[in-house]
Image (tube, helix red, strand yellow):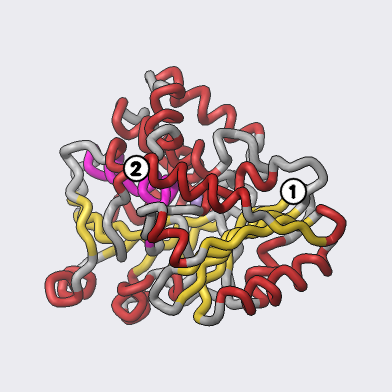
Amino acid sequence: MIEESGHRLFREVISSHDAVVLTAHMHPDGDALGSQLGLAAFLMSQGIEVTILNPDPVSETLKFIVDPRHNVQTFDPKLHQAILRGAARIILLDNSAPDRLGSMEGAMVENAGRVLCIDHHPSRNPPWADMILDQASSATAAMVFELVARQGWTPDQAAARALFTGLATDTGFFRFNSTNPQAHRIAADLLEIGVDTAATFQAVNERNTPAYTRLLGEALSGLRLDAGGAVVSVRIDTDTQVRCDARGVDTSEMTTPLLAIDGVRIALLFRDLGDGDIKVSLRSKGDINVHALAMKFGGGGHLNASGIVLAGDLGQLVDQVVAEAVRLI
Ligand SMILES: [Mn+2]
């Protein structure tokens, strides 16, 4: 639940500015974009002009929540530096860490004195002037719903769909530990507005390409087990991605079938990004803290779901991260 001071701060911001810029973390996921679009719809309903500016473009999968009234732009220093400098208020959603802002990090830090951050991740001393933080919240979209509901606003269909997508994706469609009673209450409210849960699930999770599915098959068939079967890991090298014609696909959800193996408590997926970087997706069950594990390697995220992007050799990194994971069992 958002504290009273958070609601007051939010009211103050919306009543004192007639134009705001909204932004979120790099590679905006369902919650970053969903909370942003839901908030944008509310702000626009209050006569506030909204500019949405993100470090990276909207992914193909999430385009279904972008309705035509929103112009979601990708940050280009030449075009947008001046917009950030001139903005009376910048609202940063679903992230408080400057180093998760990608190409916008410098410009955002420079303007930190006018940033309001709304987020549910653990934070590390962020530089922003104002913050509404609630680690107990399932999603930033849930926080936005709470904030706008307090202002007496009922989301319209498109805003409800965007907020539901944020809430549903961050909770793994209400399966993850982060799911709480409030998440279900908000979901119920959004369903009453007319959100189609089956269509949302299909739009998010059932649009895989044959290339993705081929890559999934290859990845799963090479699984490695450690710690007596409690740690499972797979690696996806560049050759495999080329062979499957699946370069650049998002593989983070491939951890789901790995975590579904009986006895597994930590699932790790290593993917060579082909540019010298290795991406590691970490998932865990129960109280096993893969966030702490990710932080050891410079990554971040949540207790049960985290990520690392690190330069290095795929084989070596697998050995290092698996060894640390085994120690958590
Ligand atoms: Mn989130």
Relative height, residue 134 to residue 85 (above, below): above
* 167 sits left or right of 28 in the view: right
Residue 279: image x %, image y %?
Answer: 51, 67
> Mostly what secondary structure, the magenta segment?
helix
Task: Give the Cα separation between the discs numbered 2 and 1.
Answer: 26 Å
Label 1: few (<14), some (14–19) or many (≥20) C-alpha neighbours in 10 Å: some
Q: Is residue 34 magenta?
A: yes
Instruction: Please identify the quadrant where the N terminus is shown.
Output: top right
Q: How many marks?
A: 2
Residue in the image at 40% along x and 57% along y? 243
Q: Is residue 307 visible?
A: no
Instruction: Please identify the quadrant where the C terminus is shown.
Output: bottom right
Residue type of the residue flagged with mark 1: Lys
Q: Is residue 15 visible?
A: yes
Q: Is residue 41 magenta?
A: yes
- The picture quadrant where one finds residue 160 is top left
Q: Which residue is mark 2?
A: 61
* 304 sits left or right of 6 in the view: right
Q: Secondary structure at mark 1?
A: loop
Residue in the image at 54% along x and 57% along y? 133
Relative height, residue 100 to residue 281 (above, below): below
Query: 8 or 321, which is in the foreground?
Result: 321
Residue 30: image x %, image y %?
Answer: 42, 45
Residue in the image at 38% along x and 64% along y? 26
Q: Which residue is mark 1?
A: 285
Task: Give the magenta range.
Answer: 27-45
Q: Secondary structure at mark 2?
A: helix
